[in-house]
Image: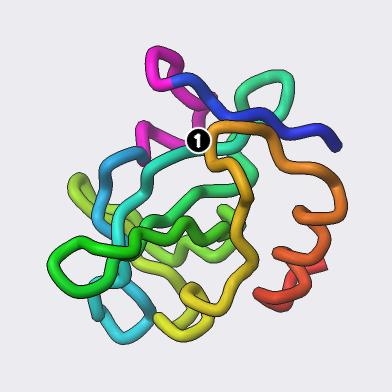
Amino acid sequence: MNLIHLPHHQHPKPPHHELRQKRVLDSGARSVGQIANLYVDDVSVVHFMDVTTSGFFGSGTKHHLVPVEAVADEDPGSITLEVDQQTVESAPTSADPHSGLDEELQRTTREHYGYR
C-alpha cells in the first residue's frame, strides 16, 4: 500500500483525531517525544506516525516511525504507546519525513513492533 505524508492543512479520517504535536508517552508513562507527521492511505486513514525525539537541549532531532496500532490510549494532549521508549528509539526512520513511505519500510517497521 502506498502511504503519503498528510499535509498539515489536512486532517486524518476518523477514528483518529488530529495527532500532530501531541506528546508521546511510552508504556511506562515516560515521555518519548512528539508526533510531527502522519502517514495516510488514499482516503486519509492514518497508518503510521512520525515521532520526533531530540538529544541534549533539542540537538540531534530524530524521526522514528510508529504504527498506529501501537497506540494504547489517547488523551487531549498526549498519546500512550503499548511499547517502551527503547522500542521507539530503535525503530526504523524515514530518510525524508515529508515524503511517503515505501512498502519495504512499512513492512520493516511493522515487524520491528511485532505487527504483521
**Left or right: where does residue 21 sit relative to residue 112?**
left
Q: Position of residue 31 (x, y in %)?
A: 24, 72
**Left or right: where does residue 55 sit relative to residue 12?**
left
Bounds of the magenta span? 8-19
Q: Position of residue 92 (x, y in %)?
A: 64, 66
Looking at the image, which is closer to me, 100 or 49? 100
Q: Which residue does the image show at 36% across and 32% down from the upper left?
A: 18
Classify residue 80 by image quadrant. Answer: bottom left
Q: Which residue does the image show at 25% across and 56% down from the upper left?
A: 23
Question: How many residues crowd mark 1 within 10 Å: few (<14), some (14–19), many (20+)?
Answer: few
Q: Position of residue 59 (x, y in %)?
A: 25, 63
Residue identifier under label 1:
15
- Residue type, label 1: Pro
**Left or right: where does residue 37 sit relative to residue 1?**
left
Asked if 10 appears above or below 45 in the picture, the reply is above
Classify residue 4 by image quadrant. Answer: top right
Q: Is residue 9 magenta?
A: yes
Asked if 46 appears above or below 115 in the picture, the reply is above
Q: Is residue 17 magenta?
A: yes
Question: Seen from this angle, which residue lies furthest front?
Answer: 59
